[in-house]
């Protein structure tokens, strides 16, 4: 009989490990450039919808429901690859964005850097 944790870490079976709130972290990277676009959370429903449709879905913690990225803006994330970390509690989603990823209009949600005690812009937000 195999140990479930050993199977999770070295086996071939996808066994996502959701936290106590039923979520796992998802880092979204641009599939071609590797740029980090955003970080969000997925529950079982969001993960299933992402796998089924090929378009990134997440769990909105503020609204407490399924959220299709780009459902109102049209700036969906077309998933090309999903990488699973060693203990299956975090994902890297490589996607091609159909427009800006950030709700501010920036290409990435990571458009500022920490300079001492201040934030400065690192890219054009248009």
Image: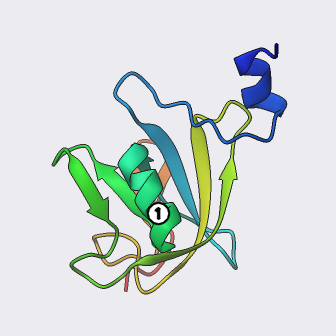
Q: Tell whether 107 sits left or right of 88.
A: left
Local SS, label 1: helix
Q: Nearer the viewer, residue 111 or 73?
A: 73
Q: Nearer the viewer, residue 23 or 35?
A: 23
Looking at the image, can residue 110 be seen? no
> In the rendering, at what x and y percent does residue 50 appear?
47, 63
Q: Residue at x 62, y 36 (%)?
A: 15
> In the rendering, at what x and y percent does residue 100 appear?
40, 80
Q: Quadrant of residue 79?
A: bottom right
Q: Quadrant of residue 96?
A: bottom right
> In the rendering, at what x and y percent does residue 120 appear?
43, 61
Q: Residue at x 77, y 14 (%)?
A: 3
Looking at the image, can residue 52 be seen? yes
- Please, is residue 30 above or below residue 60 in the view? below
Q: Tell whether 11 sits left or right of 41.
A: right
Residue located beneath label 1 in the image: 50
- Please, is residue 12 above or below residue 3 in the view? below
Q: Residue at x 72, y 29 (%)?
A: 8
Q: Residue furthest left?
A: 63
């Amino acid at each position: 009989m195999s140990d479930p944790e050993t199977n999770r870490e070295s086996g071939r079976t996808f066994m996502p490990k959701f936290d106590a709130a039923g979520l796992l972290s998802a880092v979204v990277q641009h599939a071609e450039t590797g740029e980090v676009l955003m970080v969000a959370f997925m529950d079982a429903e969001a993960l299933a919808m992402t796998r089924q449709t090929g378009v990134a879905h997440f769990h909105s913690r503020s609204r407490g429901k399924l959220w299709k990225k780009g459902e109102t803006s049209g700036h969906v994330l077309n998933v090309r690859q999903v990488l699973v970390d060693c203990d299956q509690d975090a994902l890297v989603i490589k996607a091609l964005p159909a427009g800006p990823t950030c709700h501010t209009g920036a290409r990435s949600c990571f458009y500022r850097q920490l300079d001492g005690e201040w934030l400065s812009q690192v890219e054009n937000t248009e």
